[in-house]
Amino acid sequence: MKRKFIRGLAAAAAASSLLFGAAQAATPEEQIDVILNLPVAHGDELEMRLRENGDFAVTDLDGNGRIELLFLQEMRNGLPEGVEPENENVRSAWDCIAGIPVSRKLYGYEISANGKTIDPIAVVFTDDEIDPDFRYPKGAYRDTKRGITYYDVATLTRVGDGGYRVSIQSVSLQNGGLQIQTLASEYGNYAIYHEQGTPEAIFDYAEDRYGNKIEPRAFETVASDYAAGCEERFRVSIRWHPIQALREAKIQPNGMKPLMLDSWQGFSLEPKKP
């Protein structure tokens, strides 16, 4: 039986408040002004996001003309307890492994239907509660009949001291919620060769979203197979900036706007030729 997990910044409100408005949407620059002119004295969750570390991006994932402000945080662990390699190369290899996130958190806001404020975006997990690495989507597929764009994401997560998991995920923004579907997962571990001190990923097994073992070839094509009925294909670009840079720019008059505009200008869906 499929499970559904919902994590959102007021998820219940998001489902009812983010309806498409009939009026023509303001320009992205005007919508950024709406975000920047929101009062922050009431200590809302947007202000809390600005105090944290991580990265932000400005997008329009569902193409409804109302921009989203996304925040992505990653958590990492250091070297395993008791690991103190004398070989500098081996230590560098362990540092590389330690740089792989053990978890992520994806948050978001969207300009409201009336264009006067922002609403939190719910994050809905169809199965595994694994937040996607949304920095570099591998591509996008659009179901024109349903009006939904699906983003193809590969998420690398560290498991334990030296293990890994690669999750192939489909991400879409529907009715105010980011729908996260894990299509397949690959598991393995990192072996460290002491002479060179380089970590190498060693494949263990792969499984589909139902927990059935699958061959590596099936794992590689699972995203395109899932989107076989979608009529359009896109290359995707999302431009992320550090939240710290946004926080530092905040002390300057209108200093945050250029960063947010630059992020928006770096967002694109480029059609692929058939």
Image (spheres, rainbow, N blue to C red):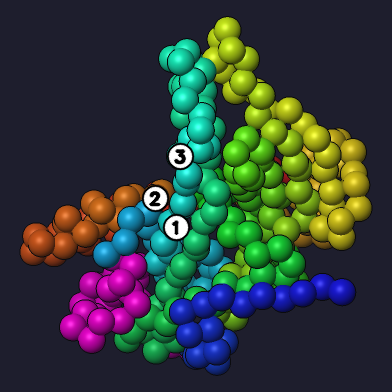
The earlier-in-sequence mark between 1 and 2 is 1
At a point 33% along the width and 84% down the height, the residue shown is 117
At a point 66% along the width and 24% down the height, the residue shown is 191
> Which SS class for mark 3?
loop
Q: Is residue 216 left or right of residue 25?
A: right
- Picture coordinates of residue 112, whole percent (x, y): 42, 84
Residue 236 visible in the shown view: no
Q: Are marks 2 and 3 in contact (CB under 8 Å)?
A: no
* Foreground of the two, 70 or 200: 200
Q: Which span of residues is magenta-colored?
A: 22-50
Residue 179: quarter of image: bottom right
| Residue 78: mark | 3
Question: Dot 1: within a 10 Å radius of its alpha carbon, few (fewer than 14), some, or many (20 or more) residues?
Answer: many
Residue 261: quarter of image: bottom left
Amino acid found under the numbered disc labelled 3: Gly
Looking at this view, name the residue that lies furthest to the top: 195
Distance from label 1 to label 2 (Cα)? 9 Å
- The residue mark sitting in front, 2 or 3, is 3
- Picture coordinates of residue 183, whole percent (x, y): 77, 55
Q: Is residue 176 left or right of residue 56?
A: right
| Residue 183: mark | none
Distance from label 2 to label 3 (Cα)? 24 Å
Q: Is residue 176 magenta?
A: no
> Which SS class for mark 2?
loop
Name the residue beneath numbered marker 1.
72
